[in-house]
Image (tube, helix red, strand yellow):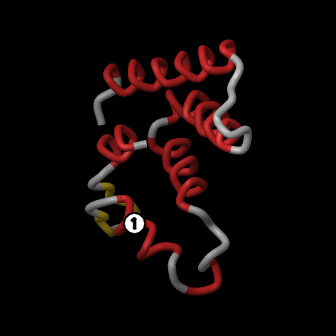
Amino acid sequence: MHGIYERLFPLKTGGTTYASFDTYFGQRFSRGPSRGRYTKHEATVDLVRQHLPHVASHYRLLKDSCFNARYRNYKVKPQDAAIARQQLQQIKSGLAKKVK
C-alpha cells in the first residue's frame, strides 16, 4: 500500500493537487453524502485502477487475500501465501518498470 501511495502522490486530478492519500481521502470522502460509505481500501483500489492499471488486478487480488487471511486468524494455506507473494512481486515489478 505504501509503495502505491508513494507512486501516486502527489496526485493532480480535477484541477486539484493532493499531497498525500490522507489529504485526498479527507477532502474527497470525509464530508457530504459519501461520508462513511467509502472506505480507504476501496478508494485505494479505485485509484490504482485509474492511475496504475498495469498493476490493478494484482493489487486487488493481494488486498482480497490479505482481508481473507485476517478473518482466518492468519492461518493461511502455504499455496495461498505463495500466491499472495507472487501478487506482491508483480506489483513491485510493475511499479519499478512504470514511471509516473
Question: Which quarter of the image is occupied by the C terminus?
Answer: top left
Res 78 quadrant in image: top right
Residue at horizontal 67 percent and vertical 72 percent from the top: 37
Which is more toward the observer, 10 or 82? 82
Residue at horizontal 60 percent and vertical 39 percent from the top: 63
Could you tell whether 51 is left or right of 69 in the image?
Answer: left
Could you tell whether 6 is left or right of 81 in the image?
Answer: left
Residue at horizontal 27 percent and vertical 55 percent from the top: 10
Q: In the rendering, at what x and y percent does residue 90 appear?
A: 48, 19
Total of numbered circles in the picture?
1
Examine the rendered structure and indicate whether residue 71 appears above or below residue 54. below
Examine the rendered structure and indicate whether residue 47 appears above or below residue 86. below
| Mark 1 residue type | Tyr
The crowding category of the residue bearing disc 1, from other C-alpha atoms within 10 Å (few below 14, some 14 to 19, many at least 20), is many
Q: In the rendering, at what x and y percent does residue 94 appear?
A: 41, 22
Q: Residue furthest bottom?
A: 32
Q: Secondary structure at mark 1?
A: helix
Q: Which residue is mark 1?
A: 24
Q: In the rendering, at what x and y percent does residue 49 appear?
A: 55, 42
Residue at horizontal 51 percent and vertical 78 percent from the top: 30
